[in-house]
Image (cartoon, coloured by chain):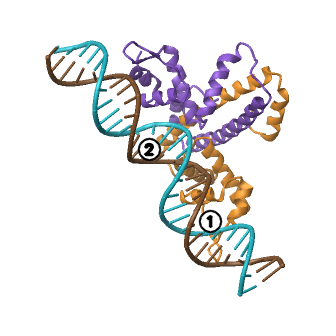
Chain colours: A orange, B purple, C cyan, D brown
DNA sequence: CTTGACATTGACATCAATGTCAAACTCTAG
DNA sequence: CTAGAGTTTGACATTGATGTCAATGTCAAG
């Protein structure tokens, strides 16, 4: 598929897909005419990247995370101590973010239930299967 | 205390404290000479704001979240339907972020354990009591 | 062949969050 | 009194993620 369809399916602007590619988060095959061509898997990849960006993960870290996911199921060679330390550092950063977001989530849920608008809560749960 | 100490204790730049105030996330008493003066509670508040910003929550939302936390323990009047809908929307956004971060966290943990650098994992756990 | 929808690259604009610098003021220590 | 550290406001720069626009190329439909 071409960039337009990919972007629509992943819920982002085509502009962003090119930006992600420029940041090394994505590689695109090129059709003979120069158009980028993508597979179904790329839809998943792009929407995951967008989610991570929204969650405050910088693109440089996203790159290594995605690379890790691909190679982690196989071997485990890439760890010259200093890299591992860096990862451990990022880990605590991510855990802090999760803690902040969890607390905010609970606050919102609290207010929403307390205000007897419980219908909206289930509506939210329907659109987002994650988060519990 | 003055802005310098507050910033040091909260782990941010004094510049940011002023910025947060400008965004309405903070109110500061003024000493007769014009200096901002803060209480111990403000340290907590500032570090929480910083955490939420790092987690990708925009300052405008942070403002309503903090306001909610203060008033939610008391009554629950403030919900003209449309506001509740907006909150429900933000809720799914936050849940998405949590899902993304959780997955990334697991990936890093996976690699760290798989690479037998388990020592760094416990080191990370020590510095961050949250995240489980 | 022409029109319209979509693609390309590249430059420029914007927005939020921060950094940085300047000029002036306050306070404490010497 | 003076030097130095910290504070004030305000302006300007920067960075990362996006939006937007321009000039051009591709392609399918009429």
| Chain on which label 1 sits | A
For image coordinates 51% across by 18% down, the residue present is B42
Q: Residue at x 48, y 31 (%)?
A: B19
Residue A74 visible from this viewpoint = no
Q: Is residue A72 left or right of residue A43?
A: left
Q: Crowding near pointer 2: few (<14 within 10 Å), some, many (20+)?
A: few
N-term mark: 1 or 2: 1
**Residue shown at the point (54%, 34%) measured from the top left:** A92
Distance from label 1 to label 2 (Cα)?
A: 31 Å
Q: Residues within 10 Å of mark 1 (few under 14, many from 20)?
A: some
Secondary structure under the numbered disc 1 in the rendered image = loop
**Residue C24 at x, y = what percent?**
29, 26
In which image quadrant can residue B57 be found? top right
Identify the image quadrant of the C terminus of chain B: top right
Residue pointed to by mark 1: A28
SS under mark 2: helix
Which residue is at the front of the view, B99 or D11? D11
Could you tell me residue D16's position as x and y percent?
A: 51, 48
Q: Report which quarter residue A42 is drawn in.
A: bottom right
- Chain where mark 2 sits: A
* Screen quadrant of the N terminus of chain B: top left
Count of numbered tags: 2
Viewer-proximal residue among D25 and B6: D25
Residue indicated by mark 2:
A82
Q: Residue B75 in the image: x percent, y percent?
A: 74, 14
Which residue is depicted at the point 54% across and 21% down?
B45
> From the viewer's perspective, is A97 left or right of A85?
right
- Please report contact status of discs 1 and 2: CB closer than 8 Å, yes or no: no
Quarter of image, res B12: top left
């Amino acid at each position: 598929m071409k960039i337009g369809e990919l972007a629509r399916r992943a819920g982002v602007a085509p502009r962003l897909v090119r930006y992600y590619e420029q940041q090394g988060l994505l590689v695109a095959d090129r059709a003979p005419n120069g158009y980028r061509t993508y597979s179904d898997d790329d839809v998943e990849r792009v929407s995951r990247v967008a989610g991570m960006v929204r969650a405050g993960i910088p693109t440089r870290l996203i790159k290594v995370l995605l690379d890790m996911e691909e190679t982690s199921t196989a071997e485990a060679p890439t760890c010259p101590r200093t890299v591992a330390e860096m990862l451990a550092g990022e880990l605590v950063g991510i855990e802090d973010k999760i803690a902040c977001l969890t607390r905010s989530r609970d606050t919102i849920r609290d207010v929403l239930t307390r205000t007897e608008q419980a219908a909206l809560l289930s509506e939210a749960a329907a659109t987002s299967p994650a988060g519990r």
